[in-house]
């Protein structure tokens, strides 16, 4: 395997909506570059970057995968990303180790919901974008006028910087070539061939359109560059050699978003796409220095002459001469190779069998058998230069988001923030053997996908797994069974209801038992009053004159808190109230901590009966994104779920709805949203606050809920 330096590397994230043909396009590019003998297909599971058993079964990309192509003296690292909204968090993570995003748009449907979202992700990190219109060969793809209309829609969405650098050649023979608007040459292809085109003359029918499009491209490239404008006005055009350099700079500076045309399925235009990436996509060494967080060790005499660690911003150039720094952007568990860590060489040069420091976890790691990944296959290399992407297996402690490097030059790269999970399910092992395997298996899944969360609900004692949506959770369950031989059952989680009071009440609890010997006696009077939401249980002590000895007051508080935790109406914890003990009596011999704790329980229950107890339910803050066409249906559905719309924003072709909806109404929302929006909508939700359950609904909940156990005490 040839060694490539940073200036001869192109790191590309292939992004876009589901079914836009990203994986198929990568297969075609690899075949055109003669990296594969045959063109892989998603349908039969032979695609290079779709090797996971779940992805093959579902025929959709669910996690990032890496492949590389050697092309005309450069290496192109390609990261295939998910296009389904449930897994788009993986796409966001893929934008950190690359220098350009290849935004794939389906020629039949145009830019869709996830296309909009990944475009925003790229814009947030100032990542250059190249638009690729794929599936131009499809019978349902638009006509010539329709293609122009698509460009106009893309310009309306993302600005006039969206400009074609190619025109497709489509005639009675279908899509079989492109016109390069920079060199003004035509490239013709044999569909279903090897992806290598032949240079020819621009067809007569496209000459006028090509000339107009060339002039529009030249004018846009010249904008903002005085010397180019002068040349443009003086000569009426820009020479090809100047135009190539200027277009490269414009793409790198995010001033132009070029549009190309391909067919990944029939391998048309793929070699020209590789040529385009070689000439116009920025190399890692061209990017601005990377901002990292360093540790500055300073001597402080006022602290006993010791040292004080302070954060400082360290700018790292993507250069072999800089200190070594690696960022781990993905972790994958392979059944045979174990844990594989994918990393970007941010600076310095990495050689195999080198020991580095994991700055995030403060542990050394030995990186044996450096590799670059061709899908699932690892190709061993001896060294990787600044800007390259590599992988290594079986690191001890390193996980996604960690920074490694030269121990003497400690820096940290901020990991890509993961959104909070949108939905939670209860998970139940089918057998004792499955229960024993569940914990380790789920931890491996969480290492692969940081979006997955696994925890036990303290109130319901259920094991819960949280993810981006129903399909995401179902994929996790399927992976547990296929890969880790762990069978589980999914079910809706119990809603963590709470109880509280709306009024105020006082009550006495007296616990008295005499069995012939040493007896038990405790007597206390407490007051309960409502508190604001989020207050929990507040305990107050207003005992004066020694009505209850000081040593027994903590026992009263313990009895109150235990009763609150056990619930009153239906066994749900009681919250948002203040319980104050203000009177009582005791016996010199028979009183004890146990007797006062039992008395407090009795007093608490008497007060609850009179203080207007009610049921509280969790209310979620929900944010929904979908095309404008579905706004009315979304609002109608939210109203049916007792939701309150807090606001709406419309931007481009999408609408964002913000609402507050009870958790009980959101358990199946992912499936409903997919149905309403034809798979083009997405949502996020997080716990916001608790509210009183409407009386009619509360009666149904209480009727089916488990009643709290008896306190085991009786008034005497």
Image (cartoon, rainbow, N blue to C red):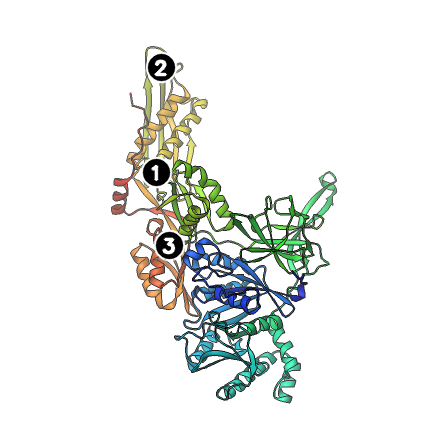
Give the class, few, some or many, for how many residues have Cα within 10 Å of label 2's Cα (few <14, many ≥20). some
Give the distance between the C-alpha atoms of the residues marked 3 and 1, in whole angstroms: 23 Å
Secondary structure, mark 3, is strand
Asked if the residue under mark 3 is in contact with the one under mark 2, i.e. CB atoms within 8 Å, the reply is no
Q: Quadrant of residue 635?
A: bottom left
Which is nearer the N-term, disc 2 or disc 1? Answer: 2
Name the residue beneath numbered marker 3.
660
Name the residue beneath numbered marker 1.
572
Name the residue beneath numbered marker 2.
519
Give the distance between the C-alpha atoms of the residues marked 2 and 1, in whole angstroms: 33 Å
Residue 258's tag is none
Q: Residue at point 32% right, 63% down?
A: 633
Q: Residue at point 31% right, 33% down?
A: 708
Give the class, few, some or many, for how many residues have Cα within 10 Å of label 3's Cα (few <14, many ≥20). many
Give the distance between the C-alpha atoms of the residues marked 2 and 3, in whole angstroms: 54 Å
Q: Residue at point 64% right, 84% down?
A: 239
Which is nearer the N-term, disc 3 or disc 1? Answer: 1
Q: Would residue 132 appear left or right of 693 to someone viewing this image?
A: right
Residue 7: x and y, percent? Answer: 67, 66
């Amino acid at each position: 395997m040839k060694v490539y330096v940073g200036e001869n590397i192109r790191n590309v994230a292939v992004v876009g909506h589901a079914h836009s043909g990203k994986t198929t396009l990568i297969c075609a590019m690899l075949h055109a570059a003669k990296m594969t003998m045959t063109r892989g297909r998603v349908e039969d599971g032979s695609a290079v970057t779709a090797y996971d058993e779940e992805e093959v079964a579902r025929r959709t990309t669910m996690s990032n995968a890496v492949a590389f192509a050697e092309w005309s003296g450069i290496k192109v690292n390609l990261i295939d990303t998910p296009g389904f909204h449930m897994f788009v968090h993986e796409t966001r993570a893929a934008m950190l180790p690359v220098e350009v995003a290849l935004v794939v748009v389906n020629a039949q449907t145009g830019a869709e919901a996830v296309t909009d979202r990944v475009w925003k992700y790229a814009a947030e990190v100032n990542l250059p974008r190249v638009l690729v219109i794929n599936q131009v060969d499809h019978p349902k793809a638009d006509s010539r006028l329709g293609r122009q209309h698509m460009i106009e829609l893309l310009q309306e969405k993302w600005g006039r910087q969206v400009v074609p650098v190619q025109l497709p050649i489509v005639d009675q023979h279908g899509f079989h070539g492109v016109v390069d608007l920079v060199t003004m040459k035509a490239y013709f292809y044999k569909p279903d061939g090897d992806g290598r085109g032949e240079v020819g003359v621009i067809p007569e029918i496209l000459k006028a359109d090509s000339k107009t499009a060339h002039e529009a491209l030249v004018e846009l490239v010249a904008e903002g560059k005085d010397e180019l404008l002068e040349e443009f006005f003086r000569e009426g055009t820009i020479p090809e050699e100047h135009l190539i350099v200027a277009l490269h700079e414009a793409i790198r500076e995010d001033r132009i978003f070029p549009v190309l045309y391909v067919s990944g399925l029939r391998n048309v235009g793929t070699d020209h796409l590789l040529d385009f990436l070689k000439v116009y996509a920025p190399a890692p060494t061209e990017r601005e220095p990377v901002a990292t967080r360093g540790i500055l060790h300073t001597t402080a005499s006022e602290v006993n002459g010791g040292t004080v660690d302070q954060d400082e911003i360290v700018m790292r150039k993507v250069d072999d001469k800089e200190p070594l720094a690696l960022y781990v952007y993905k972790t994958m568990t392979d059944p045979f190779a174990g844990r594989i860590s994918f990393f970007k060489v941010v600076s310095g040069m990495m050689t195999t069998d080198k020991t580095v420091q994991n700055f995030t976890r403060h542990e050394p790691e030995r990186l044996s058998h450096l590799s670059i990944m061709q899908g699932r296959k690892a190709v061993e290399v001896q060294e990787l230069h600044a800007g390259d992407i590599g992988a290594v297996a079986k690191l001890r402690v390193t996980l996604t988001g960690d920074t490694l490097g030269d121990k003497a030059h400690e820096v940290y790269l901020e990991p890509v923030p993961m959104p909070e999970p949108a939905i939670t399910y209860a998970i139940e092992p089918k057998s004792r053997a499955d229960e024993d395997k569940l914990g380790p298996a789920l931890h491996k899944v969480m290492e692969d996908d940081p979006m997955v969360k696994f925890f036990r609900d303290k109130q319901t004692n259920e094991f819960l797994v949280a993810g981006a949506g129903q399909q995401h959770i179902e994929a996790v369950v399927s992976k547990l069974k296929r890969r880790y031989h762990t069978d589980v059952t999914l079910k809706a989680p119990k809603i963590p209801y709470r109880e509280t009071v709306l009024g105020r009440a006082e009550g006495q609890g007296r616990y008295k038992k005499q069995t012939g010997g040493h007896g038990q006696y405790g007597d206390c009077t407490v007051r309960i009053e409502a508190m604001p939401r989020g207050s929990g249980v507040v305990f107050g002590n207003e005992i004066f004159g020694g009505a209850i000895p000081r040593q027994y007051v903590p026992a009263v508080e313990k009895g109150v808190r235990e009763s609150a935790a056990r619930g009153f109406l239906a066994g749900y914890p009681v919250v948002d109230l203040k319980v104050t003990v203000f009177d009582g009596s005791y016996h010199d011999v028979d009183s004890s901590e146990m007797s006062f704790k039992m008395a407090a329980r009795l007093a608490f229950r008497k007060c609850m009966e009179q203080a207007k107890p009610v049921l509280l339910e969790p209310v979620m803050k929900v944010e929904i994104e979908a095309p404008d066409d579905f706004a009315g249906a979304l609002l109608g559905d939210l109203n049916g779920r007792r939701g309150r719309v807090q606001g709406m924003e419309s931007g481009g072709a999408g609408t964002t709805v913000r609402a507050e909806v009870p958790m009980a109404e959101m358990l199946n929302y992912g499936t409903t949203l997919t149905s309403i929006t034809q798979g083009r909508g997405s949502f996020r939700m997080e716990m916001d606050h608790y509210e009183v359950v409407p009386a009619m609904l509360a009666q149904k909940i209480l009727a089916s809920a488990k009643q709290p156990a008896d306190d085991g005490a009786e008034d005497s």
